[in-house]
Amino acid sequence: MRHAPQDMFAAGFELLEVMQAGSWKTPAMPARYGERLRAQRGAARKLATLQNRA
């Protein structure tokens, strides 16, 4: 279930939905997956803006 949480966040699923799907009892681990995705998207968006592609 390594990529599934990132895919769920990318599709717009809420943290609680991802927690239920992965049987996590606390939000710590699925939140980390979501954090990585947000960081990647943020960096990609920033780069595109700097290169006038956004």
Image (spheres, rainbow, N blue to C red):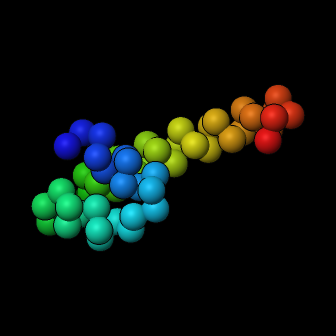
Left-right relation of 12 to 19 = right
The picture places residue 19, in percent across and down from the top left corner, at: 23, 63
Q: Seen in the image, is 5 located left or right of residue 11?
A: left
Q: Nearer the viewer, residue 28 or 40?
A: 40
Compared with residue 18, is residue 53 higher up or lower down, i.e. above or below?
A: above
Quadrant of the drawing holding the C terminus:
top right
Q: Residue furthest front?
A: 11
Depth check: 10 or 47 in front? 10
Q: Is residue 45 left or right of residue 41?
A: right
* Residue 44 falls in image quadrant: top right
Taking the image as shown, residue 43 lies to the left or right of residue 19, namely right
Query: Is residue 32 at least partly visible in the picture?
Result: no
On the image, the x and y values in percent for residue 21 come to 20, 61
The residue that appears at 62% across and 37% down in the rendered structure is 43
Q: Is residue 47 visible?
A: yes
**Quadrant assignment for the N terminus:** top left
Query: Residue at image x 82%, y 29%?
Result: 51
* Residue 5, percent from left and from top: 31, 50
Q: Quadrant of residue 49?
A: top right
Count the numbered circles shown.
0
- Please determine whether, in this image, residue 32 is positioned above or below residue 50: below
Residue 39, image x and y in percent? 53, 43
**Residue farthest right in this picture:** 52
Residue drawn where x is 72% and y is 39% of the image? 46
